Image (spheres, rainbow, N blue to C red):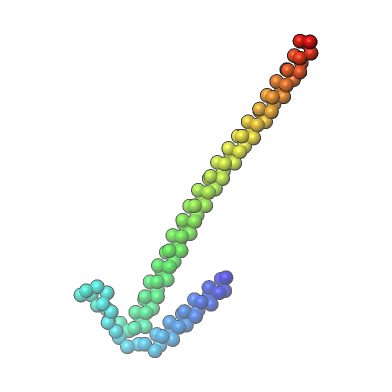
Amino acid sequence: MRVLNFFFIFLICLALVLFSIENTEPTTIQIIKGFQVKAPLSVELIMATGLGAILAWLFSLWSRMQRMLASRAETRQVREKEQQIQALEQDIERYKAEVEAKQLLLESAEPSTL
């Protein structure tokens, strides 16, 4: 998968370089009304691509952080469920011991009543 990602990034960078070589004439970009930037088209494209890459990286970090937080929450829930299961198993063992003790009492009490 990493090789495939590297290949796509390489192709995009190659296309960007080829485009930059062919488009060196200055152009004007109006960012907001009254604010214009004049630079070669290739520089503007590289800046836009860089900004897009930074935004994609930030989104990736945000997504990874959300998955990590969700994983921690799930781990905590699993741990709580395991503790509940362990407590219930201990209760079952205690109840079994109580039932066996009472059965012994009943069995020992039955012959004396006859």
Residue 81: x %, y % from top left: 57, 41
Marker count (numbered)? 0
Residue at 57% in and 74% down: 3
Which quarter of the figure has residue 44? bottom left
Residue at 41% in and 85% down: 19
Residue 48: x %, y % from top left: 37, 75
Q: Nearer the viewer, residue 89 or 104?
A: 104
Residue at 53% in and 77% down: 7
Q: Nearer the viewer, residue 77 or 105?
A: 105
Q: Nearer the viewer, residue 111 or 100?
A: 111
Q: Is residue 44 left or right of residue 1?
A: left
Which quarter of the figure has residue 17? bottom left
Task: Indicate the quadrant containing the N terminus: top left, top right, bottom left or bottom right.
Answer: bottom right
Q: Nearer the viewer, residue 38 or 97?
A: 97
Above or below for 24 versus 114: below
Above or below for 8 versus 101: below
Above or below for 105 versus 68: above
Q: Is residue 73 left or right of residue 86?
A: left
Task: Indicate the quadrant containing the C terminus: top left, top right, bottom left or bottom right.
Answer: top right
Residue 23: x %, y % from top left: 36, 87
Residue 6: x %, y % from top left: 53, 75
Q: Is residue 53 left or right of residue 27?
A: right
Residue at 27% in and 74% down: 31
Furthest residue toward left: 34
